[in-house]
Amino acid sequence: MQEREFDRFADEYLALHAKNIQVSGETPEFFAAYKVADTAELLAEKAYPDALRILDFGAGIGTSVPHFRRHFPAGELTCLDVSGRSLEIGRSRFGDVANFVRFDGSVIPFPDESFDVVFTACVFHHIDDSEHVKLLSEIRRVLVAGGTFVVFEHNPLNPLTVHAVNTCAFDENAKLIRAGHMSQRCRLAGFAKTTRHFRIFFPGALRRLRPLERYLRWLPLGAQYLIAAEK
């Protein structure tokens, strides 16, 4: 998806997203919150400093910002996006607690080893497959040695996810990516180690069962998945 397409949906993103995921029984806030919480849990196992430098790659209007602020209060958060209009909205909402930076779609405008963590949530399915390894290599470049890249994506093996994407206006040019393919592309980009978890097995009506998801993360039927890759 090009910059002008993201700009076109920026002002109505939250409303469109909420409408599109009604079948899940959840809100956009739920999906943003769980991703950052999972990231915090993952990073808690590593000996990172409290003042983490975090890059939210494809941050859009900054939906994840308050969750990063809650889980990483001492962290320095940078939100990167190709959409100027999305950045304007994000800056107006959270400009006092995060930096919002324009991305040309090719080169991340920061020096080598600028970040401890790079996070991206459901962004790569908007990017042409042929560009994935190049952009993943660019993400690896801006990570410190031993840094972590965390990517969340929709699972094309989940029929409800496929339906939601196929009926979503801002996903009209999306191409879903299998978890195994994303792991392979991370390795091709030079990441030394990857781990994979599947997520969101139960809709909102069955949220009481969600504690069981911890034991289902190996099962490739969750609505979304995360891959963590180390430099």
Image (tube, rainbow, N blue to C red):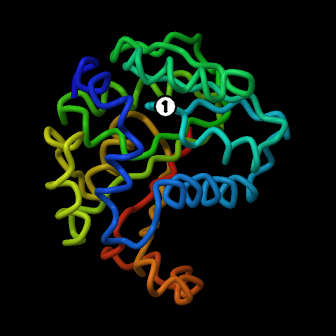
Q: In front: 189, or 111?
A: 111
**Which of the two residues, 192 or 142, is positioned nearer the viewer here?**
142
- Residue visible at 37% across and 29% down in the picture: 10
Q: Residue 94: percent from the left, percent from the top?
A: 66, 28
From the top left corner, tell me how far across and down residue 120 is, in percent: 47, 40
Name the foreground residue: 50 vs 20: 20
Q: Is residue 5 above or below residue 226?
A: above
Q: Quadrant of residue 163?
A: bottom left
- Quarter of the image with the C terminus in it: top right
Q: Where residue 131 appears, x then y in whole percent?
A: 24, 27
* Residue under label 1: 61
Residue at (78, 34) in percent of width and height? 75
- Quadrant position of the N terminus in the picture: top left
Query: Horizontally, is 200 left or right of 52 in the view?
Result: left
Say whether residue 12 is left or right of residue 125.
right
Q: Residue at x 32, y 47 (%)?
A: 16
Q: Amino acid at mark 1?
A: Ile
Residue at 31% x, 42% y is 185
